Image (cartoon, coloured by chain):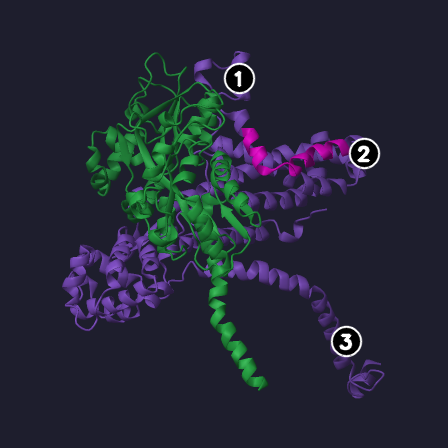
Amino acid sequence: MKLTKLAAFAATTALCAPAAIAEEMANEMTLVSWGGAYQSSQIKAYVEPYLEMHPEVKVTWDESSAEAVAKLRAMNEAGNVTWDLVDVVASDSMRLCDEGLAVEIDPAADLAAAPDGTSAEDDFGDLLVSECFVPQIVYSTTFGYRTDLVGDTAPTSVCDVFDLAAYPGKRALQKRPIDNMEWALFCDGVAKEDIYDTLGTDEGVSKALAKLDTIKDQVVWWTAGAETPQLLADGEVVMGSTFNGRLFSAIAEQNQPIGMLWDMQSFDLDGWIVPEGLPADRKARVMDFLKFATDTQRLADQAKFISYGPARASSAPLVGKHAELGIDMAPHMPTDPANATNVHIYDYEWWADNRDDLNAKFEAWLAK
Amino acid sequence: MSDMTETAGPVLAADGTPLKRSLARALRQQKLRALFLIAPLLLFILISFILPVVDMLYRSVQNGIVSKTLPNTVVALADWDATTGELPEEAVYAALAVDLKAAAEQKIHTKVGTRLNYENPGMSSLFRKTGRKAKKFDLETGGPWKETLIDINKGWGEHDNWRTLQTYSPPITSGYFLNAVDMRVGTDGPEMRPEDEQIYMKLLGRTLWMSMAITSCCILLAYPVAWLLANLPARKANLLMILVLLPFWTSLLVRTSAWKILLQQQGVINDILVYIGLVADDSRLVIINNQFGTITAMTHILLPFMILPMYSVMQTINPSYLRAAKSLGATDWTAFWRVYFPQTVPGIGAGSILVFILAIGYYITPALVGGTKGTFISNQIAFHISTSLNWGLASALGAILLAVVLVLYWAYDKIVGIDNVKLG
């Protein structure tokens, strides 16, 4: 009698358990992002609103996105993943997906549809570059110049970066082959659509490096996005590449004498991935948050705090004025038609294949 | 007397056991007790230091991923002769189809792609793209696999990809170490990489000479300071000591950034030089983002590690030796060079080893102020750990750096003698 009761009890709990666990959500979340103005735009646009709806949830931030891939790999090997949601650039999300360190996302089930009913998949469109990636923003790597140090004619073309005669002085470039090689080839006369085909050959690589050689003495190589605005503010360089949001805050928030050069800006994406191997309750919480944080309104809200374009097509019309400065944000977006007349589209797949090889060549060239 | 003991057999302890055995037992007990006392520390070092280092070093040769993910292909490919220049046979392709289907279902095919892409660009997307289709392979009725696979991605029809797959199929590889010394596995054995890819040997050489330059600068700057510290009256010496230790309590990043502000072309030093007219405004000195910047900033950061051992050694030198030398007719220089200096050598030795070994592994400061000519091999190690994710190459580079340090340590022991090093 006792035994049957016990068995019946066990059977009911066993039956109910999966349903109960699926409802269960952890009340703690560790979010990983880049720090600075970008992270605070995320806090204001969707983390704070989410916490208002769910006061029981506690959020911890870790500003480790720059080395997220290496750290996630180490956590995964140690069998102890402490992060719940990680903000990474698109190319890193591809690597995390390749390494099996990120969960595949099903846009239909995991992401919210647009208010007009367009499915998430169509709303994000081509920006879903990897099965594991939920894009938030479109940013670009582009050039800023000191308006008071470039003489009477401000630079209008990316090739002015390579023109030491017209614009003498130092330039800041990112210490990596990506973007720099493409700009070099473009300014060496290679047509935009042929850039990657050219770069795929040894002659193409030599050609790009030879073009970069012409300005090598005058380049300050940066690794952190904050360096270029600082170098520009100090007058240490006359022009330099960095993320457009960094230049926006130097210009609009700090009133530095800096101008934007949008020509051949290189589009890139930033977004979320969910690490593989989370316990069910933590994963349930994070998926709940992810759905909220990447819906149409939230992504549009983010653009009130930073000049990065929302990744959803349906968010674009909702972009308004800067929350604190009150200026219209649309003209500062990399995706604004006036800024996007000549855009460089970065080829993720190509770089995933060639980045190790080109890095070796680029580093060897740098050390020469 | 001695004759008597010899004839009387072994010496006995009070309890009748032979003294030798009794002594051995007492000593063993002592040793066990000592071992017991240091056991927590030993365990701690073993678990938190030695095991991770060994694990990291093992990665520099480990290559199990290929044979684990593609077991059938590796076996089938063993008989293939790459030198004929022909593609493998249908059996190999069939084995690959089986392996890829299994790997794609477990989502591990892309890991192999990433691994092989380090050796041959293009393998990453070859595996990623093929994996998408491989899940739907029908192993019973599908085929012929050679055509199917080449149809999916023409990469499977390229001889070079197959050669890479064969070369890197054994579970242990020398590939990472070869890469770390600017070599690679060519068609007939190891060969040098093309000139435009050679970098690590150059960086290692640069790391060594710059670390030596930094150590020398530290010796020159630290010696007078340590001497002052040891010979000033206590109150002044204490104040000076605080000044020496102050940088220790400041974050490394803050100190390095401070050097940036000082050294850059629109920085404090250049501004002063321009202001007093030593340098023209349009030809400001380039003293950062090059080797000068790295040497300056690192000398400053590592200086306390040189001053402190020197100071503690100098403090123990009896001032009466110098006075005795002088009263015997030595000049100031002779008294210093023949009497004082030799006694400070153990302090210089200890400081030099500390500074040199710290310098050789530095990467934050060189990355921030070194530009392209002033970076170290550790910057490449950091790059491969956190950015390119080629941990095998990073640990091969680390192993080489470790070996270099051990060799230099051994050489130091032979030339100066490690017993001659004193921290106080």
Q: Position of residue A175 (x, y in %)?
A: 39, 36
Classify A98 as above or below A113.
below
Reading the image, the residue beneath label 1 is: B271
User: Disc 1 marks which amino acid?
Assistant: Asp
Instruction: Say which chain tag 2 marks.
Output: B
Number of other residues with Cα within 10 Å of mark 2, as a class: few under 14, some 14 to 19, many 20 or more: few
Q: Residue at x 52, y 29 (%)?
A: B260
Instruction: Say which chain tag 1 marks.
Output: B
Return the mark for residue B26.
3
Disc 3 to disc 1, C-alpha distance = 73 Å
User: Disc 2 marks which amino acid?
Assistant: Ala
Quadrant containing the N terminus of chain B in the rendered view: bottom right
Q: Is residue B246 magenta?
A: yes
What colour has chain A? green
Q: Which chain is purple?
A: B
Q: Residue at x 47, y 72 (%)?
A: A15
Reading the image, the residue beneath label 2 is: B234
Q: Upstream in the sequence, badge 3 or badge 1? A: 3
Q: Nearer the viewer, residue A197 or B306?
A: A197
Q: Upstream in the sequence, badge 1 or badge 2? A: 2
Return the mark for residue A11.
none
Q: Is residue B312 left or right of residue B405?
A: right
Kind of element beneath mark 2 = helix
Classify A229 as above or below B182.
above
Q: Residue at x 20, y 63 (%)?
A: B82
Q: Quadrant of residue A309?
A: top left
User: Disc 3 marks which amino acid?
Assistant: Ala
Span colored in magenta: B238-259
Q: Nearer the viewer, residue B376 or B16?
A: B376
